[in-house]
Image: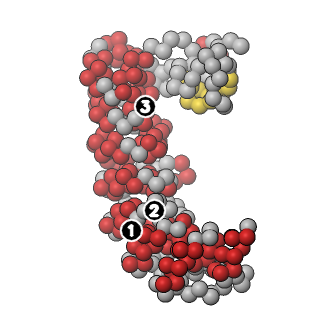
Amino acid sequence: MTQPATADLKDSPSTYESTRNVGDVLVGEHVARLLIEASSSGNDTALQNLLSQAQWIKTMHEKPHCIYSEWRPSKGANDARKVMAERTSNLERCLIVAAQNGQAAVVSTLLAFAKHQSIDALNESTARTIVYKIIGSAHADVFRVALASADPNIVNFRLPHGMLPLYEAAKRKRTDVVAVLLELGADPLHPVQQSKKIGGYNSSLMSLAAMAEGPRMVEVLLKHGCPVAHTGALHTAARCGQLETMRLLMQHGADMNEALDYYHNWMPMHFAALKGQADAMKSLEQHGAYSGLKDVKGRTPAQLLEESNTA
């Protein structure tokens, strides 16, 4: 099977057959390889040397078709398979690999280069990709050192479906990223959905934080004024069996008997019972939670626990 020809390339993201890997150019020679390697490895000195030369400045402006996903992993050098590719500037490619690998100094160098060249490096598409890469790889320093200096509004950049970076970081259990975003001015009271003031179980910031291992993310949010009441955080912590987080939430006013009318009238005890979290149920009861209240189907936490143990 042959590689795509230049005449086959489309302006919009499209599917092609290729033997090349994700990150490679779809056709032709990978002329930006040295730029990509310097950005990926964090060799800021080498990158700045390249960017002082006219030929590499020209290369940075070019937009080859690059592979960004594949239908299945490659089985070898000659394995042709379906891939997705689109036109992407070499500057954007360098920014993405640098951010993904936590190379904050390189990201700063690339953004300074873009500003000098009058390039909108943090356009919507690039900013979205970079934010996702930073959160996914938990490289909080790239936010602190590079992105926020270039554009302070990046901390509240709208991701798809209205998601904010702070919520995405909490959802993915990236406590260090959450801490840096709050430090840089992200608003913990800003709703992830415009229709909700704070959100509730499984959608509020505090509820998402309660899924993390240990109480540190909840502690960070508390220090920045994030509320506990009516967030469903204790329900989440109970379901996950996070005993330290549960104790911290109860110390800060979480209602251990709060019934969620939009979720079967379940209390934290019900959520713990559903997942067989007997220790969480015991902790709640020791702190005064009611164990005999029924949900809308007439089930007590003990009945749910029995069901979960026999499932």
Residue 124, placed above or below residue 48: below
- Residue 67 visible? The answer is yes
Residue 163, placed above or below residue 244: above
The quadrant holding residue 115 is top left
How many labels sit on residues?
3
Tell me, yes or no, whether the two marked residues, 2 and 1, touch with CB atoms within 8 Å: yes
The residue indicated by pointer 2 is 209
- Left or right, 185 with reference to 295: left
Q: What whole-number distance in Å separates the C-alpha atoms at marks 1 and 3? A: 33 Å
Q: Position of residue 160 (x, y in %)?
A: 54, 48
Classify 10 Å Cα crowding around label 3: few (below 14), some (14-19), many (20 and above). many
Query: Residue at the spot x=53%, y=79% of the render?
Result: 282
Q: Tag 1 or tag 2, which sits nearer the N-term?
A: 2
Question: Where residue 218 is drawn, which disc sits there?
Answer: none
At label 3, the amino acid type is Val
- Residue 14 visible? The answer is no
Tell me, yes or no, whether the two marked residues, 1 and 3, touch with CB atoms within 8 Å: no
The residue indicated by pointer 1 is 226
- Left or right, 257 with reference to 37: right
SS type, badge 3: helix
Q: Tag 3 or tag 2, which sits nearer the N-term?
A: 3
Residue 248, placed above or below residue 62: below
Of residue 282 and residue 110, the one placed in the foreground of this image is: 282
Residue 1, placed above or below residue 307: above
Question: Where residue 97 is drawn, which disc sits there?
Answer: 3
Q: Where does the C terminus fall, quadrant-wise?
A: bottom right
